[in-house]
Image: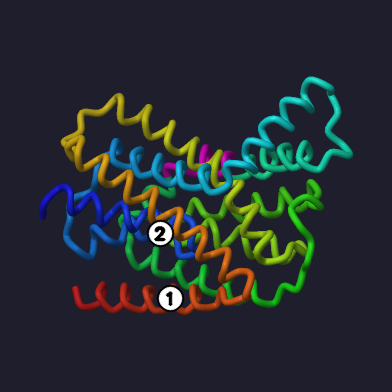
Amino acid sequence: MDDIVRAIILGLVQGTTEFLPISSSGHLMLFPWVLGWDPHSLTFDVALHLGSLAAVLTYYHRDFLRLGLSFLQGLRERRFRGYPYRMLSLLIILGTVPAAAAGFVFETRVEAMNERPTLIATFLVVTGILLLLARLGRGRRTVERMGWRDAITVGIGQAFAIIPGISRAGATITFGVFRGLAPHESARFSFYLSVPIILGAGIGQSLQAADEVQAGLGPIALVAGMLTAAISAFIAIHILLKLMASRRISIFAFYCFTLAGFIFALAWLR
């Protein structure tokens, strides 16, 4: 298959699944397995992550600008308590710690799971169950009213998402809802938390790619994949927020169950 077409397909998969609660890591591992493609290079992974990062930064550019300025002002004045956006900037940092620690400790073990499609399918079922549980939440709090316990709890949910098949968005949204956040506010904090994680993953993969000789896709294909990831991720963020506001997240649960069933059937037939 033409490299550009392949890059566009993988960019669409990455961008769409990065922010929808259906596991981007699981999809990026399953697609090459289903279609019989060779694994893509780390350089291409970095390009896809840059696309996703650009999407969330663009969608929430006013929020991130305000968060960044508030954080710097808080450092300068040494005062955070009593200032919602200053505190929120700290909570984003705090919520990132569990996933960063989990990635550092368990990265090698998790990578071994990528070669077991049925295991990924099993965790897709877990994601579906989490999404159904998220429907039970009736909280109304906003992210500006979060506390450190909320940030740690949501961060723990994000840590579980290092497992392929566990959706980062699904886990963080569910944990946030059960901490009393309104569903669309839980999704909002989930998007905030995605930035340091995506950035960290991109930097880590860039360092690895610099040390490896890779027969990857050409520059045009890389750009095509990155742009596709950025555009599809931007649309996915908008769609998820609309669905969260109307509490229709269960459609993603049934998608996870259906995809898991397909993977189990295909693995059995092979």
Q: Is residue 186 left or right of residue 224?
A: right
Secondary structure mostly seen in the magenta stretch:
helix
Q: Which residue is mark 2?
A: 16
Q: Residue furthest left?
A: 1
Mark 2, other Cα within 10 Å: few <14 / some 14–19 / many ≥20: many
Question: Is residue 107 magenta-colored?
Answer: yes
Q: Position of residue 100 (x, y in %)?
A: 57, 39
Considering only order in the chain, which callout, 2 or 1, is on the residue closer to the N terminus? 2
> Magenta segment range?
100-108
Q: Which residue shows up at 47% across the image and 73% down it?
A: 125
- In-image side of 151 versus 161 (left or right): right
Report the residue that reaches farthest toward the top: 76
Q: Position of residue 85 (x, y in %)?
A: 76, 40
Q: Is residue 176 left or right of residue 140?
A: left
* Residue occupying image coordinates x 34% and y 58%: 13
Q: Position of residue 60 (x, y in %)?
A: 58, 46
Q: Position of residue 31 (x, y in %)?
A: 27, 61
Q: Residue at x 56, y 71 (%)?
A: 243
Residue 258 image-quadrant placement: bottom left
Give the quadrant of the C terminus: bottom left
Looking at the picture, which amino acid does disc 2 mark? Thr
Residue at the image position 72 percent from the left and 25 percent from the top: 72
Instruction: Please determine whether, in this image, residue 37 is positioned above or below residue 263.
Output: above
Task: Give the amino acid type for the residue marked by disc 1 in the picture.
Answer: Tyr
The label number, if any, that marks residue 255 in the structure image: 1
Q: Which mark is residue 158?
A: none
- Cα–Cα gap, marks 1 and 2: 14 Å
Q: Nearer the viewer, residue 112 or 261?
A: 261
Q: Quadrant of residue 66?
A: top right
| Front residue (pair 136, 140) | 140
